[in-house]
Image (spheres, rainbow, N blue to C red):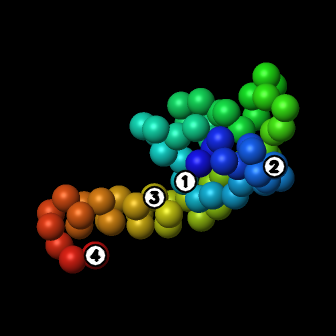
Amino acid sequence: CAGAMIHARLARLVFGTPDPKAGSAGSIYNVLTDPRLNHRVEVISGIREDECASLLRDFFQRRRSGQSL
């Protein structure tokens, strides 16, 4: 997704909570602001972070337990 944002020349990415295991917008690596690339995307994270983290945690717990989503 980060590569598509760069190619589409998006100006800004706004999201709630980062993915500590696989994120490429500031978690593991920040490809969106890499100075070696010809376009950079402004990254704004932490918007309602606790609420977003809770939603993700609940979703994946339900998915692993086989409950309906």
Q: Report x, y in % for residue 63.
A: 24, 64
**C-alpha separation, residue under disc 4 versus residue under disc 2:** 34 Å
Between 39 and 69, the one lying in front of the other is 39
Q: Report x, y in % for residue 48.
A: 59, 64
Q: Nearer the viewer, mark 4 or mark 1?
A: 4
Q: Residue at x 32, y 65 (%)?
A: 58
Q: Who comes first in sequence, dot 1 or dot 2?
A: 2
Q: What residue is shown with label 2?
A: 9
Crowding at dot 1, Cα within 10 Å, few <14 / some 14-19 / many 20+, comes out as some
Q: Is residue 11 left or right of residue 43?
A: right
Q: What residue is shown with label 1?
A: 17
Q: What residue is shown with label 4?
A: 69
Figure check: 33 above or below 60 = above
Q: Are marks 3 and 1 in contact (CB under 8 Å)?
A: yes
Q: Secondary structure at mark 2?
A: loop
Crowding at dot 3, Cα within 10 Å, few <14 / some 14-19 / many 20+, comes out as some
Q: Nearer the viewer, mark 3 or mark 2?
A: 2
Q: Report x, y in % for residue 39.
A: 83, 38
Q: Is residue 34 left or right of residue 57?
A: right
Q: What residue is shown with label 3?
A: 53
Q: Who comes first in sequence, dot 4 or dot 2?
A: 2
